[in-house]
């Protein structure tokens, strides 16, 4: 029984002692090489092993780095980030902050914005917070404009639907009135025919 408990305990601690290496990457003792692996932000691991010293993330499809990804890597010396299409909007704030804390920023001169257009080819480490925040505001303005446009389209469609319902109701009322008029005329003809059929002049 105690052996089974010990085995389960070892299984519980097993992920902590096994080196974390992303599936498409190559890993050595203190190096994780993910160069040119078509990585996106969604494909990045939630964490790297704590003993890593060098991480290669160059020439992928990364547009930002998840918040806190490098924070607990006490032995980390350098991360190669060149060759990625970095989007310098709100999501780039963590990477910019991390780069600014690095002692040798010259290693990251090739880490540049790919978009938006007014920040293209700018070195991320030297961006001001106002420049990035202004981009975030533009993004929110665009979202607000899109929301207003969708609301206008929705109201327009609702207006068309209301007009269609009104026209249909008017047409239905006319059809109902015509049906009632026809029914009255029919009843009058029937009553006239019945009255004429009961007339004494028609009896034998």
Image (spheres, helix red, strand yellow):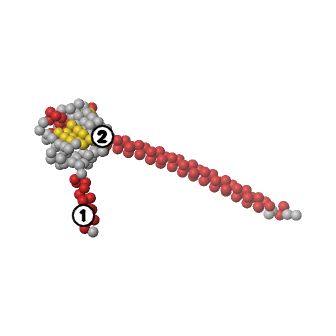
Residue 30 image-quadrant placement: top left
Q: In x, y percent, where is residue 72?
A: 17, 49
Q: Nearer the viewer, mark 1 or mark 2?
A: 1
Side of 182 where 158 appears, left or right: left
Callout 1 secondary element: helix
Mark 1 or 2, nearer chain start = 1
Which residue sits at x=18%, y=32%? Answer: 109
Looking at the image, residue 193 lies above or below residue 58 = below
Quarter of the image with the C terminus in it: bottom right
Quarter holding the N terminus is bottom left
| Relative depth, front residue between 100 and 201 | 100
Q: Is residue 181 left or right of residue 31?
A: right
Residue beneath disc 2: 39
Around disc 2, counting alpha carbons within 10 Å, would you say few (fewer than 14), some (14 to 19), or many (20 or more)?
many
Give me the residue at 24% from left, 51% from top: 18
Give the class, few, some or many, for how many residues have Cα within 10 Å of label 1's Cα (few <14, many ≥20). Answer: few
The outermost residue toward the right is 204
Whether residue 134 is visible, yes or no, is no
Residue shown at the point (19%, 48%) measured from the top left: 50
As measured in the structure, the alpha-carbon distance from the residue carrying label 1 to the one carrying label 2 is: 38 Å
Of residues 68 and 138, the one nearer the viewer is 68
Query: Can residue 2 be spotted in the picture?
Result: yes
Tag 1 residue: 6
* Above-or-below relation of 181 to 156: below
In this view, which residue lies farthest toward the front?
Answer: 3
- Relative image position of residue 26 (x, y in whole percent): 26, 41
- Please give left or right for residue 192 compared with residue 177 in the image: right
- Which residue does the image show at 20% across and 44% down from the upper left? 29
Classify mark 2: helix, strand or loop: loop
Q: Give x and y (percent) for residue 63.
A: 27, 39
Q: Position of residue 137 (x, y in %)?
A: 25, 41
């Amino acid at each position: 029984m105690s052996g089974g408990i010990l085995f389960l305990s070892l299984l519980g601690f097993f992920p902590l002692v096994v080196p974390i290496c992303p599936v498409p990457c190559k890993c050595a003792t203190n190096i994780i090489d993910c160069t040119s692996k078509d990585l996106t932000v969604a494909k990045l691991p939630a964490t790297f092993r704590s003993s890593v010293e060098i991480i290669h993330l160059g020439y992928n499809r990364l547009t930002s780095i998840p918040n806190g990804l490098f924070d607990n890597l006490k032995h980390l010396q350098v991360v190669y980030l060149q060759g990625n299409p970095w989007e310098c909007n709100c999501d780039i704030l963590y990477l910019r902050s991390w780069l600014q804390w690095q002692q040798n920023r010259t290693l990251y001169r090739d880490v540049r914005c790919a978009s938006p257009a007014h920040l293209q080819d700018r070195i991320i480490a030297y961006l001001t917070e106002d420049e990035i925040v202004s981009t975030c505001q533009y993004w929110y303005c665009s979202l607000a404009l899109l929301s207003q446009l969708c609301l206008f389209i929705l109201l327009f469609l609702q207006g068309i639907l209301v007009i269609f319902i009104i026209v249909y109701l008017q047409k239905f009322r006319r059809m109902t009135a015509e049906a009632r008029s026809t029914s009255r005329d029919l009843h009058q003809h029937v009553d006239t025919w019945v009255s004429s059929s009961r007339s004494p002049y028609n009896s034998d």
